[in-house]
Image: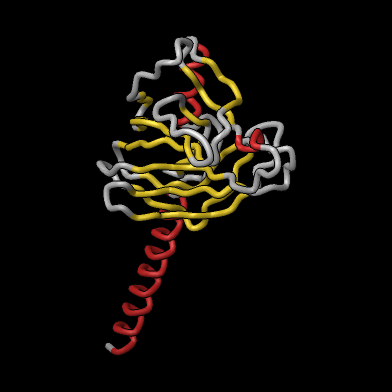
Amino acid sequence: MKTKLKSGFVYFMLIMSVLVLSCGKDDEAEKLPCDETNTTFNQLYDDLVNNQGYINQVTMDTEIHEYTFEIYIQKDICQIGYESQHDDPLKNYTIEIEDKTNNIILYTGNHNFSGGGTVYQPINPAITIQQGNIYTIRRIQTDWAPLIHNTIGRLLQEPNSVMVFPYTWGDLTIISSNFYQNGGPAPNFAIPYIDIVFSN
């Protein structure tokens, strides 16, 4: 009798181990990679340039470029993409993500984006943002002296200089934008190219 109970217990433990291991593998499989190719923001930006005639240019010499947005499903921000326009490509930019609904800065980090194309920097750990909340993402460049043109950045502008917010693509809506500090403010002048990479 004891042998049967012991065998049954061993068998039960083996089954439980297999279940636990397989659950762990499934959880890992469900985690999507942080993939910067074809992001939602980039699709929105490209559609406005390629299909609606908006102008992709580099300008606006203010220290802060930002846009305000919302999403329609909970997301994790795992990378930020930006292209440096600074004469010194080693100069860092500060990236901030603010939860405007709750008046909380969720993320502040200094990143080097170099130049010659969009560079992606990780946000680790990823920042979870919630459906229904309003967020602002901003890039800050205060290390520009002596040349104010070191604060310029890539942006998207409507041909007649009149942006008509909001702009939506998929589950991302850009509500407004602003360019300010040591110049401006210039609300809703354009959409600054600050790419957000979601991992889900």
| Among the 4 quarters of the image, the one containing residue 186 | top left
From the top left corner, tell me how far across and down residue 34 is, in percent.
52, 44
Q: Is residue 175 above or below residue 13?
A: above
Q: Is residue 75 visible?
A: yes
Q: Is residue 51 left or right of residue 20?
A: right
Residue 12 or residue 153, whichever sits in front: 153
Residue at figure coordinates x 47%, y 42% from the top left: 138
Image coordinates for residue 199, horizontal then vertical, percent: 46, 44
Rendering colour mode:
secondary structure
188 sits left or right of 115 in the view: left
- Give the quadrant of the N terminus: bottom left
At a point 37% along the width and 63% down the height, the residue shown is 19
Please state, as top left, top right, bottom left or bottom right, where the C terminus lies in the image: top left
How many numbered marks are there? 0
Image coords of residue 37 (percent x, y): 56, 33
Q: Position of residue 71 (x, y in %)?
A: 32, 37
Q: Nearer the viewer, residue 157 or 130?
A: 157
Q: Could you tell whether 156 is left or right of 18 in the image?
A: right
Foreground: 161 or 74?
A: 161
Say whether residue 84 is visible: no
In the rendered image, the vertical position of residue 156 relative to residue 103, given as above or below: above
**Residue lying at 33% horizontally and 25% vertically, measured from the top left:** 166
Residue at the outermost left position: 132
The structure residue drawn at horizontal position 47% and vertical position 37%, both measured from the top left corner, is 180
